[in-house]
Image (tube, helix red, strand yellow):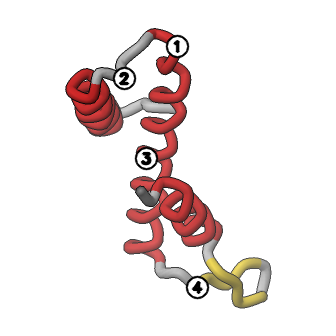
Amino acid sequence: MFDSAEDWSTTAGYWSAIIGEMRDAGTLAAVNGHSVERLVMAQVVGDRATAAVAREGAIRRIKGTVRKSPAWIVARRIRTVLQP
């Protein structure tokens, strides 16, 4: 899923920020590992989708029909879920 150095750098940044905040709040525990992993993956996928929308636009012609870009739908859903 993360095949470029940029992806790994972004992932490491999110992971470090989340772990640091959990450590400061006293909520860091091994049981939260999978939740942190899912959160980081969602953030990276959201970033990719947002970048795709910035490059390609929110509206695309797919098989001759004008539709919302799949990347726009993903970006919107992930941002809705990740809002604090």
Where residue 20 sits in the image (x, y, percent)? 22, 27
Q: Is residue 62 above or below residue 83?
A: below
- CA separation in Å, label 1 and label 4: 41 Å
Residue at which label 3 appears: 43
Residue at (29% x, 21% y) in the render = 26
Residue at (48% x, 81% y) in the render = 57
- CA separation in Å, label 3 and label 1: 20 Å
Marks 3 and 2 in Cβ contact (< 8 Å): no
The earlier-in-sequence mark between 3 and 4 is 3
Examine the image and state in which quarter residue 76 appears: bottom right
Residue at which label 1 appears: 31
The earlier-in-sequence mark between 3 and 1 is 1
Residue 59's label in the rendered image is 4
Q: Residue farthest to the front?
A: 26
**Mark 2 packing: few (<14 Cα in 10 Å), some, or many (20+)?**
few
Can the viewer see residue 12? no
- CA separation in Å, label 4 and label 2: 41 Å
Q: Which mark is in front, 2 or 1? A: 2
Can the viewer see residue 30? yes
Where residue 36 sits in the image (x, y, percent)? 45, 28
